[in-house]
Amino acid sequence: MSKIQVDAIEQQTACGTTLTAGGGAGKTVVVDATTVTLGRCGGTVALASGASQTGFGRTGTVDWQTGSIKTSTFTAANGEGYFANTSGGAFTMNLPAGSAGAIVSVVDYTNTFQTNNLTISPNGTEKIGGVAADAVLSTEGQSVTFVYIDGTEGWKNVQDSTSNVTGNPNLVATGGTITTSGNFKIHTFTGPGTFTVCKVSCTAADNTVSYLVLAGGGSASGITSGGNAVGGAGAGGYRENKSPVDTYSASPSEGSTDVVVTAQGYPITVGGGASGGSGSAPVAGGQGNPSTGIGITSAGGGAGGSREILGIGGTGGSGGGAGGGGNNSGCRAAGNTPPVSPSQGNAGGSSPSGPPDTGAGGGGGAGAVGSDAAGRGGNGGNGQTTSISGSPVAYGGGGGGGAGPPQNTSGTAGTGGGGTGGTATNPGSGGTTNRGGGGGGGGLNAAVPGAQGGSGIVIIRYKFQ
């Protein structure tokens, strides 16, 4: 056998940049020395494309077996990581015989460990975390990494993740107070804000949102001593729409315009209730303030009327009730003004003409007209009940009409935040905050300011998972 001994091999020509050692395919190059240095300072040592390495030891990681998804009991090998698919049922991963530094990883492939567990079983009498027993993975999306240390602790879990980072195909938004109900997220605005759509859903139908846009309720007129009873104020306009993919129980007024959102900010305005009329002389009540959001506007509730001023009451989302002691028989202040479909509210109640009748009409509500006065004050019209917030809540009640002697019986508040009518000794009560209720009318011969309306609310709801 011939042998050539040299101290160094150097490239001798100026041409080319590659020095090749070895005879090509099928040949082996052996470098036999105590110390072998590959590369130089600042250089790069790389494996050829498609080549593999052995004998260099591990770096604390595993080689993930992406081409072999596990669906039944198997035995793991040192240095490998596995994707365990338990969607078809629970099974076991048997750990290999332990040797110091051995490493094995596993991850929940289908996010089903919480339903079908993966059991980790040590080899023979070896231990997991110092205990000679199986371990069970039962958390959705869990991934773990075990390293074998010694006979005392055996396999030790050095990395455990219960977070499952995935792409989100659903609508993502911010703004308001955010709650959830099943698969739906709910944004509630009780004051001004912005509903910001950060990302639309990959499913087009899920970008049609459900909403409730409720305006502020009207207020009642103020009266001085010796004045006539005041009509209850109307509720704020009520507009609701339920997305075709939504599941909550909507009100009968549901069915307003579909709104398909895009990635942008939508300013939200929540209408305040009107302030009650007051002063040394009778002062008219006011119309509630409108609420707006995602292209929908609801009108404020109409003011409650009085004989001295405003007569039959003011128009609005729902109309105010007519004042007592006037020529208001059969006269109703219109609701749903301006008109939308379905109607955002109803008319207020009327009051019979002239003394000695002492009652005033009730304010209109989102779900019903205000009642006519008949000696006593008319009841406020009822509002509408919806579960858009996750539980049933009534909104948009009309205010009760005021009354005085001899019956001295005021109108009741409409369900959904309306105020109760007043009497000769008690003023009317205000509408409920964020329910859009109309204020209750004051009673005959009671020198009181008119009751204020309740503020509105805007609720937006969509599928988020």
Image (tube, rainbow, N blue to C red):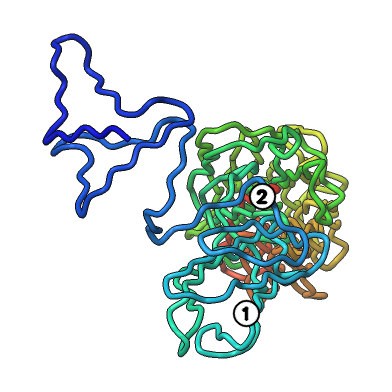
Q: CA distance from mark 1 to mark 2?
A: 44 Å
Q: Amino acid at mark 1?
A: Asn
Q: Helix, strand, or loop for circle 2?
A: loop
The front one of 313 and 28 is: 28
**In the picture shown, does residue 259 fall above or below 249?**
above
The answer to which of marks 1 and 2 sits earlier in the sequence is 1
* Residue shown at 75% from the left, 55% from the top: 363
The front one of 216 and 326 is: 216
Question: In the rendered image, which quarter contains the N terminus?
Answer: top left
Q: How many marks?
A: 2
Q: Helix, strand, or loop for circle 1?
A: loop
Q: In the rendering, at what x and y percent does residue 102 appear? A: 47, 69
User: Residue 428 vs residue 386: left or right?
Assistant: left
Q: Amino acid at mark 2?
A: Phe
* Residue shown at 52% from the left, 53% from the top: 176
Give the quarter of the image for residue 205: top right
Labelled disc at residue 464: 2
Q: In the rendering, at what x and y percent does residue 130 appear? A: 50, 89
Which mark lies nearer to you, 1 or 2?
A: 1
Residue extending farthest to the top is 15
Q: In the rendering, at what x and y percent does residue 8 appear? A: 13, 33
Give the quarter of the image for residue 186: bottom right
Q: Which residue is mark 1?
A: 123
CB atoms of marks 1 and 2 within 8 Å: no
* Residue shown at 48% from the left, 31% from the top: 26
Q: In the rendering, at what x and y percent does residue 64 appear? A: 56, 52
Give the quarter of the image for residue 417: bottom right
Density class for disc 2 (Cα within 10 Å; few <14, some 14-19, many ≥20) is: some
* Residue shown at 58% from the left, 60% from the top: 452
